[in-house]
Amino acid sequence: MAESELYRKGTEIRRQLMGDKLVDKMAGSVYDDPMMKKFGDYAREAVFGMLWSRPGLDLKTRALICVISDASTHALPELAIHLRMARRQGWTEDELSEALLHLAGYIGLPAVREAMLTAKEVFAELRKEG
């Protein structure tokens, strides 16, 4: 794929949100074959380059929106990624767990329980990583 301006912008935003270590890890595991590379290139340009760079909301708020969306749609692998992004943007474990708990009245306890179990694992990993 030719690197468009949106692709370059998406690359920069993605690294800012995830950090070099996670981006590099995903490049060697998730996006290591042609099919997933195409997906990653598309997401980098369309999602990170177009959506995340729009004016009107800061990256911290956008990260929280993704956490809420993932919990609501039971997208637990994505939730793990977005929780990491949210922590890098300054959300605390307490704030994120409270946001998830708040969803219980709207999406139900079973979905929130699964989201909180995912958060528990991610937060433990982040603490180990320092």
Image (spheres, helix red, strand yellow):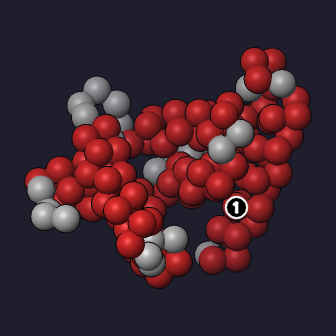
Q: Relative to 31, say whether 113 is above or below.
A: above
Total labels: the figure holds 1
Q: Which residue is mark 1?
A: 122
The residue that appears at 75% across and 18% down in the rendered structure is: 106
Q: What kind of element bears circle 1?
A: helix
Left or right position of 58 against 90? left
Is any part of residue 87 visible from this angle? no
Work out whether residue 94 or residue 28 is closer to the camera in this orientation and state it: 28
* Image position, residue 20 (x, y; %): 40, 74
Q: Residue furthest front?
A: 35
The residue that appears at 82% across and 51% down in the rendered structure is: 117
| Rendering quarter of residue 107 | top right
Quadrant where the C terminus lies?
Answer: bottom right
Q: Relative to 88, say whether 69 is above or below.
A: above
* Image position, residue 126 (x, y; %): 65, 68
* Image position, residue 68 (x, y; %): 61, 34
The residue that appears at 20% across and 56% down in the rendered structure is: 7
Quadrant where the N terminus lies?
Answer: bottom left
Q: Relative to 67, say whether 8 is above or below.
A: below
Work out whether residue 7 or residue 66 is closer to the camera in this orientation and state it: 7
> Disc 1 residue type?
Val
Crowd class of label 1 (few under 14; some 14 to 19; many from 20; radius 10 Å): some
Is any part of residue 57 visible from this angle? yes
* Image position, residue 10 (x, y; %): 26, 54
Work out whether residue 81 or residue 41 is closer to the camera in this orientation and state it: 41
| Rendering quarter of residue 103 | top right
Left or right position of 130 against 44? right
